[in-house]
């Protein structure tokens, strides 16, 4: 009888400690806390699917409410890999919200590329986000960026790709289908070459819906959550065009990194105004070609604005002091008759002025009103904003 009870108890404990796996629709994100929004979960799933398709890596992220320690977190990740992951190369991560502990399991080539230091940096990126939703998105986006730039070569995919899903063209995403395949290919080639030359990503995105967001928020988020941007500051520029009826069309320019510093609000407004006529006439090829020229001109300004070295400051101060001293010495050298006096009585000639009477008389009033001018930050700089991922973006938008 005792043996049966012991077996039943062991079975119950085994069931309690077995990880709860997600459905097939969400094979990469396991959220046992219900803290990740469905929108961001779909974004993360799309990113993970893209990584697996293009690089052969399966990336899994798990949010769990509680474990008994770091060893259990690692074991949890190992169980996820053993039961749910079929890819040879895998990065399986989990975060214990109660104890603020994380663990991971690496398989295949991931053990060679994702070092302890790399994993620490990735989880620092997760914990630095204000909410878990943004943290998971930032974590997976950074994994994709590492695979894009530092670690792995893309896997050669032999199956035909669907252009409407934008697998063929990384820099041209024509969701609204306003360009022909030949135009997309030519524009993508131009933007790819320019991006490589200037070390910044330049992207054209067309959509038929903003999914409830503003045009700027949509552009910022698409840039951040789809792995765009080069360098530590993820420099780049994205042009968004939303189709629609007259008065309901949107166009937006989003900048980040080095391009944030180069492109002022006035630059952005002037450029958008210049291509609106082409967009209204459905002359999309000319409008997007103008974007290529604009991007090249602005990218040429990167690094040109430089500040003087700090050593110039004391030198300038010294030169100013010497020049002021020389001028003051020259002016005071001619005052031979002037002597220092202790009292002011010697400066007044006695009985030189005698007042017999005095009165105040109002003559007239002269009032001049000048309207207060309001300065716009867009005229000479970039107002800027923070996207949902926490990144700083510039650029403006227009509706027409």
Image: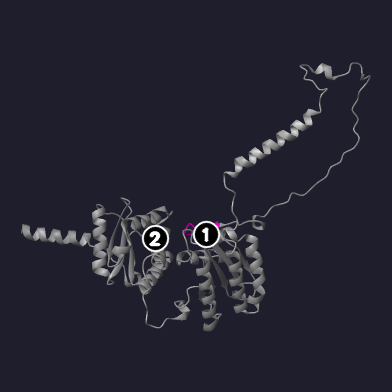
The percent coordinates of residue 144 (x first, y second) are: 40, 66
Q: Residue at x 60, y 70 (%)?
A: 250
Dot label at residue 257? 1
In front here: 287 or 111?
111
- Give the CA separation, mark 2 to mark 1: 19 Å
Q: Residue at x 52, y 73 (%)?
A: 193
Q: Which residue is mark 2?
A: 139
Numbered range of the magenta stretch? 385-391
The percent coordinates of residue 208 (x first, y second) are: 54, 75
The percent coordinates of residue 29 (x first, y second) are: 35, 65
Dot label at residue 382? none
From the viewer's perspective, is 328 left or right of 31? right
SS type, badge 2: helix
Image position of 148 with respect to 161: above or below: above
SS type, badge 1: loop
Residue 27 seen in this snapshot:
no
In front here: 257 or 44?
257
Label 2 with label 1: CB-CB less than 8 Å: no
Residue 91 in which image quadrant: bottom left
Tell how many labels: 2
Q: Residue at x 66, y 66 (%)?
A: 270
From the viewer's perspective, is 396 left or right of 346? left
């Amino acid at each position: 009888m005792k043996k049966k009870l012991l077996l039943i108890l062991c079975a119950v404990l085994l069931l309690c400690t077995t990880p709860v796996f997600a459905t097939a629709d969400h094979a990469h994100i396991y959220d046992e806390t219900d803290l990740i929004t469905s929108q961001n979960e779909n974004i993360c799933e799309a990113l993970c699917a893209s990584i697996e398709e293009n690089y052969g890596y399966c990336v899994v992220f798990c949010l769990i409410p509680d474990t008994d320690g770091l060893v259990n977190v690692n074991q949890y990740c190992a169980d996820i890999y053993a039961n749910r992951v079929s890819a040879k190369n895998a990065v399986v991560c989990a975060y214990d919200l109660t104890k603020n502990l994380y663990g991971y399991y690496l398989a295949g080539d991931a053990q060679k590329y994702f070092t302890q230091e790399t994993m620490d940096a990735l989880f620092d990126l997760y914990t630095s986000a204000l909410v878990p939703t943004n943290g998971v998105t930032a974590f997976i986006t950074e994994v994709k960026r590492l695979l894009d730039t530092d670690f792995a070569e893309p896997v050669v995919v032999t199956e035909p790709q669907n252009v409407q899903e934008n697998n063929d063209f990384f820099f041209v995403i024509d969701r609204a289908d306003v360009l022909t395949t030949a135009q997309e290919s030519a524009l993508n080639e131009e933007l790819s070459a320019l991006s490589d030359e200037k070390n910044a990503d330049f992207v054209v995105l067309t959509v038929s819906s903003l999914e409830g967001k503003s045009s700027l928020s949509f552009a910022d988020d698409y840039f951040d959550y789809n792995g765009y941007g080069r360098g530590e500051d993820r420099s780049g520029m994205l042009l968004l065009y939303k189709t629609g009826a007259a008065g309901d069309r949107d166009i937006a320019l989003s900048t980040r990194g080095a391009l944030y510093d180069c492109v002022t609000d006035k630059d952005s407004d002037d450029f958008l105004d210049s291509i609106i006529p082409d967009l209204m006439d459905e002359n999309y090829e000319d409008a997007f070609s103008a974007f290529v020229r604009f991007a090249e001109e602005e990218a040429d300004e990167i690094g040109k604005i430089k500040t003087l070295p700090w050593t110039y400051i004391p030198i300038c101060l010294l030169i100013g002091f010497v020049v002021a001293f020389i001028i003051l010495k020259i002016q005071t050298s001619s005052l031979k008759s002037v002597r220092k006096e202790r009292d002011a009585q010697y400066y007044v000639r006695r009985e030189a002025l005698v007042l017999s009477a005095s009165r105040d008389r109002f003559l007239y009033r002269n009032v001049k009103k000048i309207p207060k001018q309001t300065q716009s930050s867009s005229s000479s700089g970039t107002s800027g904003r923070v996207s949902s991922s926490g990144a700083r973006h510039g650029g403006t938008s227009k509706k027409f």
